[in-house]
Amino acid sequence: MGGLGALSAMLLHRDSFNTCIMLNSGAKLEDIDVSEFIPINKWKQMVGGIQNDWEYKLEKNDKAKIFSRIFLGNSPSSLKKELREISRKVCFVLGGSDSVTKYKSIQDIEPDEHGLATLKIPGINHFLSIDMQWNKWFKLVINMIAQFDDSATKEVLTHNEIINEFIQYQIKYGVFELPRICCMDRIADPIEKTNFHRVLYAAEGSYGNLQTAIIEMYLALERMAKRPRLYPSFETYPYDGLFGRRAVVAYGIHPNVVHEVLKEQKMHAVKGETIPKIGDLLVKGKHISEEQRDKLLKP
């Protein structure tokens, strides 16, 4: 169960760990076969008691929620989503003959159409210290772990590279209409579309979700607008059509206000919350009235 604790720590403190490598671990409590040590009915009774405590007694804080998903197997869709976000940093090493932790249990938590890094060693049992075959595989596994850890430190693309790619696609194709809308059909060239898929994947992994990366792009565009001569390609971007820019022109709002509103949008995106519209935030901050907002929204 130490591996389950390690995975819990990884999800709770992602910035504190480079990788999470689990050796013969990863199955929720109910799936662990302890029949060689204690009667299975007693084990299931204990797990049922923990589940009951979770439902009726335990405080529902972040630690308890992670415990519920990993140890008890609750909310599997939420766990799959979280594991997808950190999939480049998580690896399962499993013995092919392990009767305690079953491979199927790992498959059950794999993000759909994505998967998880898994090394399955043929003939290896759960208790490695008494497995005579383990020595034959030890060096290979250690080297693999070292290489996996090294790979996890290298992002597919840096934050600056992702935002630069986003800006180029936005200027050329206008792929983003809102932080929630990505119009990939506007990219006709199949090679460019494939590359854009790669950038989107890197953005989700690097920023945690796509919305945060898109808002970061809009923040970068605001900075570019202050120094357009430094960015020749910016001249072809319909910057004046953005709601924030239209509010600046129509009502004399300072550009810094738009920048701060975008930062507020980003804060909601980072937390995975519903992202309020710029117009609504400007009204909330009393920078414009509801009537002024509605007037700008009219085509």
Image (cartoon, helix red, strand yellow):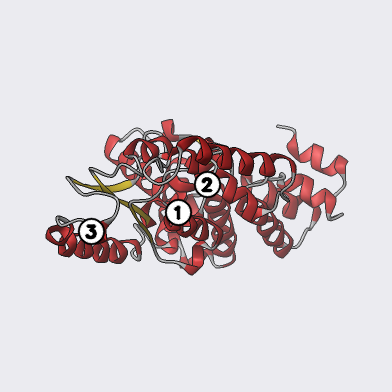
- Badge nearest the viewer, 3 or 1: 3
Q: CA distance from mark 3 to mark 1?
A: 19 Å
The outermost residue toward the left is 136
Question: What amino acid type is highlighted by mark number 1?
Answer: Met
285 displayed left or right of 135 = right
The span from disc 2 to disc 3 (Cα, nearest Å) is 26 Å
Report the Cα–Cα distance between label 2 and label 1: 9 Å
* Amino acid, disc 2: Phe
The amino acid on which the numbered mark 3 sits, given as a three-letter code, is: Ile
- In the picture, the disc for residue 90 is none
Mark 3 closeness class: few <14, some 14–19, many ≥20 residues within 10 Å: few
> Disc 2 or disc 3, which is closer to the eye?
3
**Kind of element beneath mark 2:** loop
Q: Looking at the picture, does residue 20 appear above or below residue 35?
A: below
Locate residue 71, reporting x and y percent: 52, 46
Name the N-terminal-most of marks 3 and 1. Answer: 1
Residue identified by numbered label 1: 1
Q: Please report whichever mark, 2 or 3, sits nearer to the chain's N-terminal start.
A: 2
Q: Position of residue 28 (x, y in %)?
A: 47, 43
Mark 1: secondary structure: loop
Label 3: element kind: helix
